[in-house]
Image (cartoon, grey):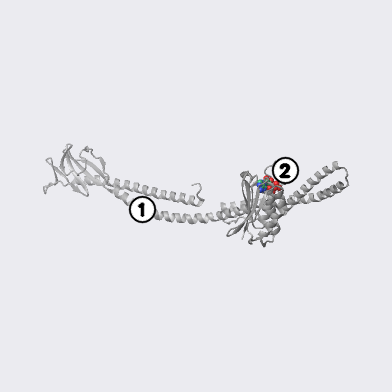
Amino acid sequence: MKSMSLRKKLILWYSLFFLGLIITNLVIVFLASDTVISENAREEIQETSEDVAETLDIVNGIVYYDFEEGERFIYFEDGIAFVLYLNGQFYEGQYPANLPDDFPIQAYLTQTYDTPTSTWFIYDLPLQDGYTLRAFYNYQGGVSVYDDFLRVLAIVAPILLGISTLGGLVIIQRTLKPVQAMAKTAKTIQSTENFQLRLDEPKTHDEIDTLAKTLNQMLEKVEASLEREREFSANVSHELRTPLAVIQAQTEYLESKLNDSAYQKDFETIHHQLTHMQSLIDQMLELARMNATTQVPLESVDIIPLLTSIREDFMPMAQSKSIQLTGPQTSNQVQIHTHVTFFIRSLSNLLENALKFTPENGTVTLDVTRHPKRVDITVTDTGIGIAADEQDKIFEALYQVDAARSDAQSGIGLGLALTKQMIKQCGGSIALKSTPNVGTTFTVSFPV
Ligand code: ADP
């Protein structure tokens, strides 16, 4: 039940409820009609007994049906059988077969006796001279009514159930359609991080319409606040650039004027930190300016030569750590639509990280795999890996897994945020698989 869609749950509940309703109705109708019919049977046995009693003549202790004609008592009238008792003892008539003969005489009372297929009503009417007229009525109404209702149930219930389920399905489908559309758009917003998108408002002036409107207002606020944040960091970065450039120039000038080698070391440190800050600010500015919806011109390129050239650029770094850097394996053309500069920078960032976070004597492999609808470019290393709970966070700006290990590598934690953004601008996506102390594979996919 938990994993069922809302639509299925509603239909299941609705159908079960309707089935229950049909059965309850039929049972109520059956019970009510059975009561009425058995009530009628009681009345009938009493009335017929009284009619029969009126026609009887008891002369000198003998019971005649018609004294004048000398006709004796009859035993059957309107489906009711009669016997006579005298002073509490069976006297005359034919007692119904299969019926116990030990019912006590109970004047003016109707006794019942149930057999599996019917009910017997037994009624005692006292006559004169110690006689009692006993009537038997075999009532099968309950059972036949029950059969009828079962038949009705078997035919009517599936038809009603079918109609109600189909009707329900149409209504539920119609009601849930805007919700499905909303969920689809929300998923797109979530995966593309394009907060300019809006949910379709069904304009039905109901709860779903209100929900869509409210969510759209929320999206507007999110978009505005993201925009503000981006503008803010763009402004701050921009403002910091000029003074930083001045400090840098002045430091270089002072450094050249200094002859004391003791100060030389301090200046080198200042210089190094300034360069680091400058690169941080440049990247922040770039990230702030880059917008998910900004279009960059894409061109069709063969990525194999690009990847080979990137690999060659990183050869010295790999050799300095005795890391085996290989790939891509194929020399056949693999054409994709991309932005060449963003492509080179993204793959360079991934390769640089792979080399940075792989210990000496490890391997880093570049590879390209064609799929029917996409091309995957993988960067695999045998490095320190990334714990599962960190894997999403490393794409956030300024996030570094472990300050200690990253500090030693002098990163700033913007590389992957920029990489992800650039790949997205090129219409691609990025994912990773990693096992701590075994290695990491980053996969960049482009549609073809
Ligand atoms: P940095 O400038 O620190 O490299 P990134 O955004 O490029 O910033 O990476 C963020 C963090 O993700 C890094 O600090 C590092 O901890 C982790 N990381 C990235 N690539 C790898 C990798 N190939 N192996 C292990 N950890 C990685």
* Disc 2 from disc 1: Cα separation: 79 Å
Q: Check the picture and name the quadrant holding the C terminus.
A: bottom right
381 or 45: which is nearer to us? Answer: 381
Q: Which mark identifies residue 408?
A: 2
Return the residue found at the far bottom. 300
| Residue drawn 74% across the image and 50% down it | 233
Q: Is mark 2 within 8 Å of ligand 1?
A: no
Q: Taking the image as drawn, is residue 123 in sight?
A: yes
Disc 1: CA contacts within 10 A as few (<14), some (14-19) or many (>=20): few
Q: Position of residue 364 (x, y in %)?
A: 65, 50
Residue displayed at 47% across by 52% down = 11
Identified by mark 1, the residue type is Ala
Residue at image position (79%, 46%) is 272
Along the line of sight, the residue nearer the viewer: 291 or 90: 291
What is the three-letter code of the residue carrying label 2? Ala
Q: Tag 2's secondary structure?
A: helix
* Nearest the eye: 26 or 285: 285
Q: Label 2 crowding class (10 Å Cα cut-off): few <14, some 14-19, many 20+?
A: few
Name above or below for residue 313 compared with residue 113: below
Tag nearer the camera, 2 or 1: 2
Q: Is residue 313 above or below residue 101?
A: below
Is residue 35 rendered to the left or right of residue 81?
right
From the viewer's perspective, tell me whether residue 130 is left or right of residue 316: left
What is the x, y in percent for residue 178?
56, 55
Pointer 1 residue: 154
Q: Position of residue 263 (x, y in %)?
A: 85, 42
Where residue 262 sits in the image (x, y, percent)?
Answer: 85, 41
